Amino acid sequence: MDIAILGAGAMGSLFGGLLAQAGEHVTLLDINDAHLDAIGTQGLQLETDHGERRIRNLQAMRPGAATRRPDLLIVFTKAMHTRAALASARHLIGPSTHVLTLQNGLGNVEALVPVVPRERIFVGVTTWPADLTGPGRVRSHGAGAIRMMTADGAQSPALARAVHALTNAGLNCHADENVWGAVWEKVAFNAALNPLCTVLNRPVDALGAVEDGPALALAIANEVLAVARATGIPVDAAKVGDNVRHAIVAHCGHKPSMLQDVLAGRPTEIESINGAVVATARRHGVPVPHTETLMQLVRLLQAQGLSPGAP
């Protein structure tokens, strides 16, 4: 396939590198010139459980410099940057281009619809881990998976082709008719752990210091799942609870991206995660006091431009 990836951060670079390694024609699109230059001159250095290698059979450029219309455009920008990124890449979306969003949070399909018909949008979630360790360098250790489906719920040859390409690259991809359940389950996980770690300025495992940590995280996750059920979406509370507890035990030293953003003085994804949950909860009359409080605290941190715990 001819695949372009819009947003070549840690996840976008990991996916691009693995897809190129599997023989797909891959173009990474980003505005991080140092990262693009490093890939252009040295290739993408990829470190996984299978070792280290340099991937050279892929292109990396700013969106405005690209001219080739892909079969599949994978969007990996943060949710608040989706519309601006799409505007810069709109000339690449042809009449047969499909667009896949694997972004965090809610509202990603709605951001794509003005540019791409719903029947050509794929929505999904991924659990693959990735860290950008420097310009042109990405690291990923551990297992992951992708669950995806067309935004209108219809099976299609294009969906099957995309699933095959991602699976062939080792990314463990499956078409899932309950993809919206998967989306909400991941939102519940992120709405609990990301803001808690951000407000505390502590890694995920620090939440296990006292019993209150896991209890609070699970209370937040359950609030989010209640909102999902109110919208008619089936979700698996036991699985989400297991994932939250496992992360607190196993993700030692891991700082969620929301905490990293606040520490770096960047905007966070709080609006597309907790903010979107709170807005939906209000429409359906579901109380979400913990989720709303965390949203307000992170908004305050952003407004002050301070790192957590700063004087």
Image (cartoon, rainbow, N blue to C red):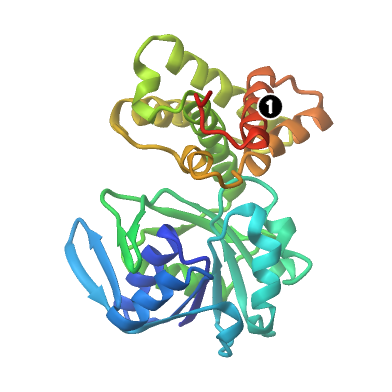
Residue situated furthest bottom in the rendering: 67
Residue at image point 66% right, 80% down: 93
From the viewer's side, name the closer residue of 67 and 20: 67
Residue 96 shows up from this direction:
no
Left-right relation of 85 to 217: right
**In the displayed structure image, the side of residue 189 where residue 140 appears, left or right:** left
Q: Could you tell me if residue 181 is visible in this image?
A: yes
Q: Residue furthest left?
A: 51
Residue 306 vertical position relative to residue 131 in the rendered view, above or below: above
Total labels: the figure holds 1
Of residues 177 and 116, which is closer to you in this image?
116
Q: Position of residue 296 (x, y in %)?
A: 68, 27
The x and y percentages for residue 4 are 51, 77
The image quadrant that residue 195 belongs to is top right
The residue beneath circle 1 is 296
Q: Position of residue 262 (x, y in %)?
A: 53, 39
Give the farthest residue toward the top.
211
State whether residue 132 is above or below residue 207: below
Which structural element holds mark 1?
Answer: helix
Instruction: Specify the farthest residue to the front.
Output: 311
* Residue in the image at 36% along x and 53% along y: 130
Q: Residue at x 74, y 36 (%)?
A: 231
Which amino acid type is shown beneath numbered disc 1? Gln
Residue 204 lies in quadrant:
top left
**In the figure, is residue 60 to the left or right of 227?**
left
* In the image, residue 143 above or below residue 263: below
Residue at image location 29% in from the left, 31% down from the top: 250
Quarter-wise, where is residue 246 in the image?
A: top left
- 10 Å crowding of disc 1: few (<14), some (14-19), many (20+): some
Pick whichever, 28 or 24, lies toward us. Answer: 28
